[in-house]
C-alpha cells in the first residue's frame, strides 16, 4: 500500500472506508457485540460545539475541489466512495456531530441501529450538546453538500459529454465525406478499368487488319523481286550461252 493510501485509511472516516472492503466478506456472520467507541481527542473536543436546541450553523464551507468523477480511469464503485469520503472529511464541521457518530458506529463493525445508538450514547457523555436533532441536522447538511458537489460535477461532465458528442458527430461527418469521395474514386477507377479491359480485348481486332496488310505487301514485294531476279538470271544465262 502506498503512503497516500495509508493516509486515506488513517483519516477521520477510516472505519467507514474500511467497511467498503469488508462488506463482501461479512456474509451472514452475526456481528460481535459492539465495543465502546473511542472518545474523540481533546483537540476535537476543544473546538466549539453546537447546542442541542439549535441546528448547526454552517461554517460557510463549500464542497472542496476534489472531483468525484475525475478523469483518472476510476470506474470502480469502491474507489469512487473513497473519493466521496475524502470530500466528507474536508467538510467536517467542528464539534461532535453526525460525522463522529457515523464513523464510531462503523468502528463497531457495521452501521446499523444498535451501533448508531451505542455510538450516540457514548459520544453524548463526551459532548453534552449532542442530540438527535443535531445528528439529523448535521447529517442532512453533509448530504446536501455532497449533492451540491456531484451536481456541479454532473454539470461539468454533461458539458464534457456534449463536447465529446459534438466531436463524434464532426468525425462521423468527416469520415462519411471521405468515404463518399473514396467510393466515387473507386467507381471511377472501376469504370476506367472496365474500359481498359474492353480495349485490351479489342486490341487484336484493331491492329490485325493492318498487320495482315503489311504482311501481304511484304509477301507480294518478295514475290515480285523473286520473279524479277529470276528474269535477270535467265537473261544472264542466255548471255553467257550466246555471246562469246
Image: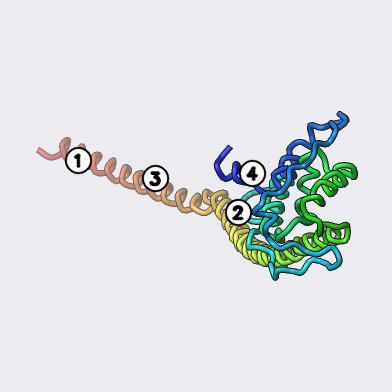
How far apart marks 4 and 2 lie (CA) works out to 77 Å
In this image, 243 relative to 1: left or right? left
Q: Is residue 68 visible?
A: no
In this image, 74 relative to 126: left or right? left
Pick whichever of labels 4 and 2 is earlier in the sequence.
4
How far apart marks 3 and 4 lie (CA) works out to 110 Å
- Residue 71 position by quadrant: bottom right
* Mark 4 residue crowding within 10 angstroms, few (<14) / some (14–19) / many (20+): few
* Residue at numbered disc 2: 194
* Residue at numbered disc 4: 10
Residue 45 at x, y percent in the picture: 70, 55
Q: Does dot 4 land on a helix, a strand or a loop?
A: loop
How far apart marks 3 and 1 lie (CA) works out to 25 Å
Task: Work out which residue is located at the far top of the displayed protein and give it.
Answer: 29
Pick whichever of labels 3 and 4 is earlier in the sequence.
4
* Residue at numbered disc 3: 219
* Mark 2 residue crowding within 10 angstroms, few (<14) / some (14–19) / many (20+): few
Q: Residue at x 60, y 59 (%)?
A: 182
How far apart marks 4 and 1 lie (CA) works out to 131 Å
In this image, 225 relative to 6: left or right? left
Q: Residue at x 75, y 64 (%)?
A: 145
Q: Is residue 106 above or below residue 157?
A: above
How far apart marks 2 and 1 lie (CA) works out to 63 Å
Q: Does dot 1 land on a helix, a strand or a loop?
A: helix
Amino acid at each position: 500500500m502506498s503512503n497516500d493510501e495509508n493516509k486515506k485509511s488513517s483519516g477521520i472516516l477510516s472505519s467507514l472506508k474500511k467497511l467498503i472492503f469488508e462488506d463482501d466478506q461479512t456474509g451472514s456472520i452475526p456481528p460481535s457485540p459492539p465495543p465502546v467507541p473511542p472518545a474523540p481527542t481533546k483537540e476535537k473536543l476543544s473546538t466549539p460545539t453546537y447546542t442541542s436546541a439549535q441546528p448547526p450553523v454552517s461554517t460557510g464551507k463549500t464542497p472542496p475541489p476534489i472531483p468525484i468523477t475525475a478523469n483518472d480511469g476510476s470506474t470502480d464503485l469502491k474507489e469512487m466512495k473513497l473519493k466521496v469520503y475524502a470530500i466528507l472529511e474536508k467538510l467536517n464541521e467542528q464539534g461532535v456531530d453526525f460525522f463522529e457518530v457515523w464513523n464510531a458506529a462503523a468502528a463497531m463493525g457495521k452501521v446499523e441501529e444498535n451501533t448508531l445508538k451505542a455510538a450516540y450514547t457514548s459520544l453524548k457523555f463526551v459532548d453534552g450538546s449532542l442530540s438527535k436533532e443535531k445528528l439529523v441536522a448535521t447529517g442532512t447538511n453533509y448530504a446536501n453538500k455532497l449533492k451540491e458537489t456531484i451536481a456541479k460535477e454532473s454539470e461539468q461532465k454533461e458539458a464534457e459529454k456534449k463536447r465529446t458528442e459534438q466531436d463524434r458527430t464532426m468525425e462521423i461527418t468527416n469520415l462519411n465525406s471521405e468515404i463518399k469521395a473514396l467510393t466515387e474514386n473507386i467507381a471511377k477507377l472501376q469504370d476506367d478499368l472496365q474500359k481498359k479491359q474492353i480495349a485490351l480485348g479489342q486490341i487484336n481486332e484493331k491492329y490485325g487488319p493492318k498487320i495482315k496488310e503489311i504482311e501481304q505487301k511484304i509477301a507480294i514485294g518478295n514475290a515480285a523481286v523473286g520473279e524479277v531476279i529470276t528474269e535477270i538470271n535467265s537473261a544472264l544465262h542466255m548471255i553467257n550461252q550466246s555471246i562469246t
